[in-house]
């Protein structure tokens, strides 16, 4: 049986909007931009495909298949998901801090609202949940790559283009999730921005001072009896008038 001759297909059409130029508006509700992460993901896929074509041209079919392996493609996706989560978390924290400075929100309470690494990992998990179809396509790609050497290379090519299409769908789902995350945190940012320091302590102190001044005036004016602790001060006051 002869070895399969691998022909790495052009993946641009299958990746669809992954390689598109940044659209307007290029940012989410809080201003988190993900276009550069998307283009890095696309570039990574193209680089793997280019390496695969070079190996295929050298009659290294196994190397060509390995260059576009499940692990390599999944690694690109996971890096993109992590990058998007980091970007969103950094944007949210920046907006919270700016809103806190604007409203003079208590620093201690603001620190409790800022996203932590655990929060970022949770965001990444939610963003990555849309990639289930892509992961399933990678499983099929891996199985086709393990076929007998004489098996048709067409099956592997079809599995690869299917994985590329699923990657586009996964990214579009990630973008929707990113917008949802930002909309969720927009509410918290606006709550911090709208915060105002309570005025009742100031009014209470003002009333206490006013009441004390009124009482002291009545005492020194002779309208109220002078308490023993203030008698010396009252006599001095009267002597200076």
Image (spheres, grey):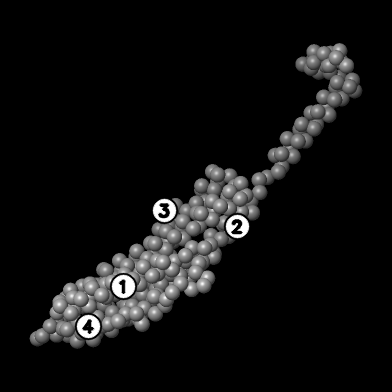
Residue at which label 4 appears? 7
Q: Secondary structure at mark 3?
A: helix
Label 1 Cα crowd, 10 Å radius (few <14 / some 14-19 / many 20+): many
User: Sequence order check: which comes first, mark 2 or mark 1?
Assistant: 1
**Spatial CA span between label 3 and label 4:** 43 Å
Closer to the camera, 66 or 124?
Answer: 66
**Spatial CA span between label 1 and label 4:** 16 Å
Q: Position of residue 9 (x, y in %)?
A: 27, 82
Closer to the camera, 225 or 87?
Answer: 87
User: Sequence order check: which comes first, mark 2 or mark 3?
Assistant: 3
**Spatial CA span between label 2 and label 3:** 23 Å
**Spatial CA span between label 2 and label 1:** 39 Å
Residue at which label 3 appears? 117
Residue at which label 2 appears? 190
Task: State the residue at coordinates (50%, 67%).
Answer: 27
Residue at which label 1 appears? 45
Q: Are marks 1 and 4 in contact (CB under 8 Å)?
A: no
Task: State the residue at coordinates (77%, 16%).
Answer: 229
Q: Position of residue 217 (x, y in %)?
A: 85, 25
Q: Is residue 240 left or right of residue 22?
A: right
């Amino acid at each position: 049986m002869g070895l399969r001759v691998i022909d790495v297909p052009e993946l641009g059409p299958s990746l669809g909007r992954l390689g598109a130029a940044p659209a307007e508006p290029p940012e989410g509700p809080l201003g988190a931009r993900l276009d550069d992460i998307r283009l890095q993901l696309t570039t990574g896929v193209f680089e793997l495909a280019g390496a695969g074509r070079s190996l295929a041209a050298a009659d290294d079919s196994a190397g060509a298949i390995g260059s576009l392996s499940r692990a390599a493609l999944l690694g690109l996706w996971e890096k993109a998901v992590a990058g998007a989560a980091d970007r969103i978390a950094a944007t949210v924290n920046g907006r919270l801090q700016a809103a806190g400075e604007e409203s003079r929100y208590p620093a201690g309470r603001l620190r409790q609202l800022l996203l932590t690494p655990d929060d970022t990992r949770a965001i990444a998990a939610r963003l990555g949940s849309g990639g289930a179809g892509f992961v399933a396509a990678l499983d099929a790609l891996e199985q086709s790559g393990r076929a007998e050497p004489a098996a048709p290379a067409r099956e592997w090519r079809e599995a690869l283009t299917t994985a590329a299409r699923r990657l586009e769908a996964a990214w579009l789902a990630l973008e929707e999730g990113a917008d949802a995350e930002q909309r969720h945190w927009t509410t918290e940012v606006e709550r911090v921005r709208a915060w105002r320091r309570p005025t009742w302590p100031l009014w209470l102190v003002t009333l206490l001072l006013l009441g004390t001044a009124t009482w002291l005036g009545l005492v020194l004016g002779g309208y109220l009896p002078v308490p023993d602790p203030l008698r010396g001060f009252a006599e001095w006051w009267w002597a200076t008038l």
